Amino acid sequence: MTTILVVDDSAADRRLVAGILEKGGDWTILEARDGIDALDQIELMAPDIVVTDLVMPRLNGRELVELIGRDFPQIPVILMTSQGSEQIAVRAMQVGASSYVSKKLLPKELCDMVARLLSETREDRVHVKLMHRLADYRSTFVLENDPDLISLFVAYADNIVRTIGALKSGERREFSAALKEALSNAIFHGNLEMGDQLETRTSQSLRDVALEKAGQPPFDSRRVNIELKCSQSRILAKVTDDGDGFDVNQHPLPDDIADIDRTKAKGILLMHINLDELRFDERGNAVTLVKRKLGR
């Protein structure tokens, strides 16, 4: 039986939405009075879809979307908006909401929207069910020195890890943070030799300079090679740049994380604390990142 959780701090509005949904399909309707209550019910009941108000006390709809996306990414969320809150709803979609609908259009649009998302979710879950049985995944990428590719590849790798089920959500976030740092080091430090500018420029200025420098020799021929390997128990990424490398021994890590601001190897330290293994080759232009599922 399909279960839909309706979240709204107004009891009257909850019943209105539940009544609309009860007429739209053979669905079990649950109700939660705010975002905190909704999270408790999601833990207990694992609904197939969440329909939530945007403006609520304690935990609003946007915050609820972020937490569901982090801890229950398989559950789609529809936001209900009042007049004037559409802009907020669009921002909420940027952090994971599946769709939004104006409250005045609920009788006309909500049931069709729920049915469509449930169909898409079923297809996704069949895919995930199959991917959870994938024993081993390997791929190789060659990236230009475009800073925009960093976040794109990190998101791609995280999706692979999530779909296969190799790591839990917290472990995925730690691996993603380390992978982002490795790719940034490969492009900015390794290939483009911009280490002296990283502390003084804004992110936009750094991006502009990087793109300009990437089109000039000898930097225009340099690439970042990535080997990605994923199994049910761990993920491994080897990131290699075409730069001159560096002497890892010249950048010792502090013994205490509290000393991070006093080390020149902040990126290496951040990778080190987020991974189970961190290995550099002799030249210092290739780094291997390993993250294992807890308990393996």
Image (spheres, rainbow, N blue to C red):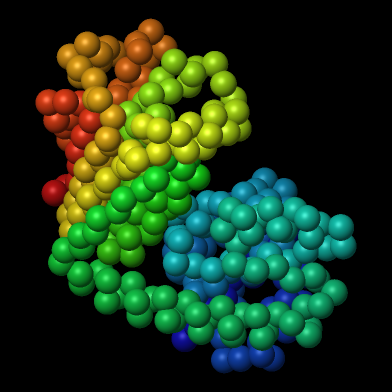
Q: Residue at x 45, y 60 (%)?
A: 72
Residue occupying the far top of the picture? 262
Whether residue 173 can be seen here: no
Q: Nearer the viewer, residue 201 or 74?
A: 201
Q: Is residue 226 above or below residue 39?
A: above
**What is the x, y in percent for residue 34?**
66, 56
Image label count: 0
Q: Report x, y in % for residue 128.
A: 33, 72
Image quadrant in which you'd find residue 258: top left
On the image, the x and y values in percent for residue 56 come to 73, 53
Rendered view: 167 above or below 5 = above
Using the rendered view, name the quadrant where residue 251 is placed: top left
Q: Is residue 128 visible?
A: yes
Q: Is residue 12 left or right of residue 263?
A: right
Q: Which residue sits at x=46%, y=61%?
A: 73
Q: Residue at x 69, y 53 (%)?
A: 91
Residue 182 in percent (x, y) is at 32, 35
The residue that appears at 72% across and 48% down in the rendered structure is: 57
Residue 129 relative to residue 288: left or right: right
Seen from the viewer's position, the closer of residues 167 and 212 is 212
Left or right of 267 on screen, residue 91: right
Residue furthest to the right in view is 83
